Amino acid sequence: MKKFTTFILASLLLATGLSAQKTPIVGVVDFNRVRAESTEIKAAVERVQGSLAPVNEEIQRMQASMQAIITEMRETQAKADNPAASEAARAEAASRIGVLQAEGQELEARFNQFRQQAQQLQQKGQEDVQPLIVKAIEATKKVAEDKGIDLVVPSASILYHDEELEITDAVIAVLNSGE
């Protein structure tokens, strides 16, 4: 009988302990929306894109020029290799190929320089945006604490969530208010 009473008492204590545990409260945040709708983050991203635009345009122009040189080199090489062409035409084509090769090498060197500059600008831009991402995470923590949320999950990591768990709007509001 004593064992049975001890068992009942232990079961009651265990049940009481389990029911007293707090159910975790979960929130969901869409960081893509936070980045897109936070005025500070959006402005920083636009500054980065603005600084990269001229460099990227020049890189595209250089790529088009390199393609044109390659095309002209192929056509000129065909003229130089044409046995039906006169000796003077073949010599002129061979001379032109040398000029095109030099132009191509110069353009390739400038292209590599611009590409390196674009990478440096991209890296600097990421360094400028990183503190704002940290600020977004801090805003998420603040909203979670204010709402009594124990766990915040990025929406990109989950398949489904109830809209009641969504805190993205609150995070954006905190970021845009400057708190």
Image (tube, grey):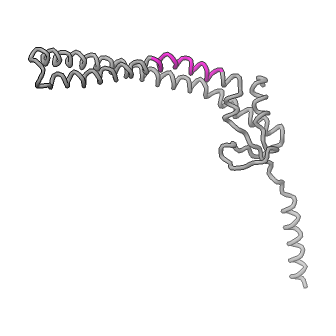
Task: Please tell me whether the stretch drawn in magenta is mainly helix, strand or loop.
Answer: helix
Q: Is 37 left, or right, of 87 in this rendering?
A: right
Q: Position of residue 31 (x, y in %)?
A: 68, 36
Q: Residue at x 75, y 27 (%)?
A: 175
Q: Residue at x 34, y 23 (%)?
A: 67
Residue 6 is a magenta residue: no
The quadrant where residue 10 appears: bottom right
The part of the chain drawn in magenta is 43-57
Q: Residue at x 33, y 18 (%)?
A: 107
Q: Position of residue 160 (x, y in %)?
A: 72, 49
Q: Position of residue 82 (x, y in %)?
A: 14, 25
Q: Position of residue 44 (x, y in %)?
A: 63, 21
The quadrant where residue 3 appears: bottom right
In front of the other: 58 or 1: 58
List the single residue furthest toward the left.
87
Q: Is 154 left, or right, of 103 in this rendering?
A: right
Q: Residue at x 47, y 18 (%)?
A: 57
The C terminus - image quarter: top right
In front of the other: 16 or 176: 176
Q: Is 166 left, or right, of 75 in this rendering?
A: right
In front of the other: 124 or 42: 42
